[in-house]
Structures are given as structure tokens and as C-alpha cells.
Image (cartoon, rainbow, N blue to C red):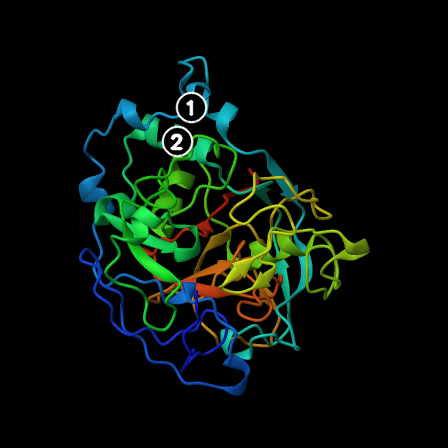
Amino acid sequence: MAMAPVLNICVVLFFSILAVSCDVGDIVQEQRSESPESQGTDCGCQGLKREVSVGVSDVNTLDHHDDANIYSKTANEGPDKTESDVRSKLVLLQGGWFLMGTDDPGIPQDGEGPQRKVKLDAFYIEEHEVTNQQFQHFTNQTGYITEAERFGDSFVFEGLLSEEVKSTLSHAVAAAPWWSPVKGADWRHPEGPDSTIHNRMNHPALHVSWDDARAYCQWAKRRLPTEAEWELACRGGLQDRMYPWGNKLMPRGQHYANLWQGDFPNHNTAEDGYANTSPVMSFPANGFGLYDMVGNAWEWTADWWTVHHSAEDKFNPKGPESGTDRVKKGGSYMCHKSYCYRYRCAARSQNTPDSSASNLGFRCASDVDP
């Protein structure tokens, strides 16, 4: 697929999105300034935003038990299975001081700097991203309907679509034509209505909006991590390093994360073994025993987005009190240095809380009981 010229990009996921109708939920038009660093460094997933929101509390009072959507027998074994059996293992992090952000940003416009000292209280974080099987337990037990299901569509990377689904497309994101709103795409159907999660129950749940992620965490008696908590967890105890394992992308020639290899967006050589998501825990854990902190799927955090940070010391920062976009961290299987150099611990991006896409998931955190 030929790549259209990328204009007016404000670094990695800072696209100027031209308003593109997608029948249910239009893409918000955003105009952002261009800089030299932004040239050719964005996969476009930051611009996958909706204009209209659907009230979660209003819709999810409805029962939604569709046996056709129950893919995993083990996810519905019976009342002897408790919530603690299906939730991810929590890893205790002791908190303390760490260096957040960087003074050598890969994408300055994303607000990666300045580097500042942050002190956190102890907290727990899940060892891997929430999986399809875990998310299915949640929806089966609560009847929850995700925002992608209610909107009727979600964004999918075109390179993953079948020819049949491609033939039905009428719209694409103008500044990132490899993204299209696909009717029938949701967490159960990651690449549209002709796809399933049958063989991907241990892959990260995708097409999950911030609102959906928060609902899952509340059901699991957990919460989303703050951006500071997420970044401390990502660093795995290392100080001032780019990746969870150090500064070299491929130590000893080995892949440590599920990322894009090849020519984005035309060809993914899948040298790491995966052209799409990988099962959680497929790559080495970091120093804290946490998996997939970068790559595989973007992860929501609790914070509202801002690019303005003080260099002063901070204690348990939680971001701005309000905003329009939420922070996401970690990058995904689509990230490549030439277009989305956001698979670094200090890297960050944003989406509106109701956004969903085929590379966007989450993990939960939890407070330490007093």
C-alpha cells in the first residue's frame, strides 16, 4: 500500500486529523503546528477520536447475555470461579523517588520533558495487560457493552483487514490512510465482523476505550495507574534509561518487545514473531517482573493530558484536574522508530476517553491497603 504524504504532523501521534465521517461517531478535526522533528514520525493513532460520546451509565443498565459471544469455555466454568481467579497477578512496587520524563526527548512536542524527580507511595500494578479472557469474564458477569459496540465501529489498521472488509470501507483517516473506521470492529472482533478472538484469549483486549478500561478496573476492585505510576513500573528499577531493559533496543540481538519491523505502514516483516498482538508474557519481563510495558498494545493511564510539566519535585502527581484527552503509554505492535518512536518509558501520547482502536488496551493498578 502506498503511503500518502504526511503533512502537519506534530510528532509521533500528533496528527492533524481532517474531519472524516464514519457514520457513527465522527473524527474530531484537530489542527496542530508542524515542527522539523515531527516529519515522518507518526502512526496516526493519536488522531483516532470520536466527536460524540455515549453515556456509559445510561446504556450499561441493560442485560447483554449473548451466548454466541461466549468464546472460551474456561471463562464461564461456574460459580466456583471467583474474581480473584481471573484477575491478573498484582506486583507490589515500593514507590520512592525516581526520575520521570527525559531531558533528551525523542518527541519534544509530546511533553516528554523536563526530567523531574517524583516520589510515589507504594502501589500494586498488574504484571501484564488485561487479556481477552479476563475482559470476557467482566462482560459476562456484568453485561457491560463497550463503547465501540455501542458506536457500531472502531478504528482498525488497514493492513490487518480481510479483502472482504476492505471492500466495504468508505472512509479513512485523511492524514493516516492506513487507519479506517470499521463497522463491527470491537474487542470480540478485532479486525472487523469476520474476525474473532477464538485463538487469542491470552492476547491483550483491544478496542477498549478509557471509559471501558475504568469500568473493568472498578469491577476488578482496582483502578487505572497514574502516568507516574505507569512510568515507574515501566523503568523496572533502572535510572534514566530509554527502555524497560536499558538503552539498547535489541540486547544480544534479541527482541524484548512486540514492535514493528520493516517499512511502516507498507510491510511488517514480523521478525519478532508477531505482525499483530502477541500473547501476554511472550517477551522478557523487566526488573520488576512486569511484561509488555512497551509494545504489544498501548495502555491507558488515569491522567488527563498536558504537555506542560514543572521541573520541581513532585509527590504522587496525578496530572491536570481536567482536560479533553487521557494519557496513554507504552506504544504498540505498530510502533517503529521512523513513525512512532513511542516505545520508550518516557514517551507518551493521548486520545479522547471514548477512543478505541486495534492497538489500544490497558492494565490495572491498586492502592496498598493501609
Callouts 2 and 1 close, C-beta under 8 Å: yes
Q: Residue visible at 57% across and 72% down? A: 112
Q: Residue visible at 41% across and 56% down? A: 157
Identify the secondary structure beneath mark 1: loop
Badge count: 2
| Residue where numbered disc 1 is placed | 72
Front-most of residues 283 and 285: 283
Which numbered circle lies on residue 136?
A: 2
- Name the amino acid, label 1: Ser
Q: Earlier in the sequence, mark 2 or mark 1?
A: 1
Q: Position of residue 122 (x, y in %)?
A: 62, 47
Q: Residue visible at 35% across and 40% down? A: 189
Neighbourhood count class around disc 2 (C-alpha, 10 Å): few under 14, some 14–19, many 20 upward: many
Q: Position of residue 271 (x, y in %)?
A: 65, 52
Q: Quadrant of the N terminus?
A: bottom left
- Name the amino acid, label 2: Gln
Front-most of residues 142 and 65: 65
Q: Quadrant of the C terminus?
A: top right
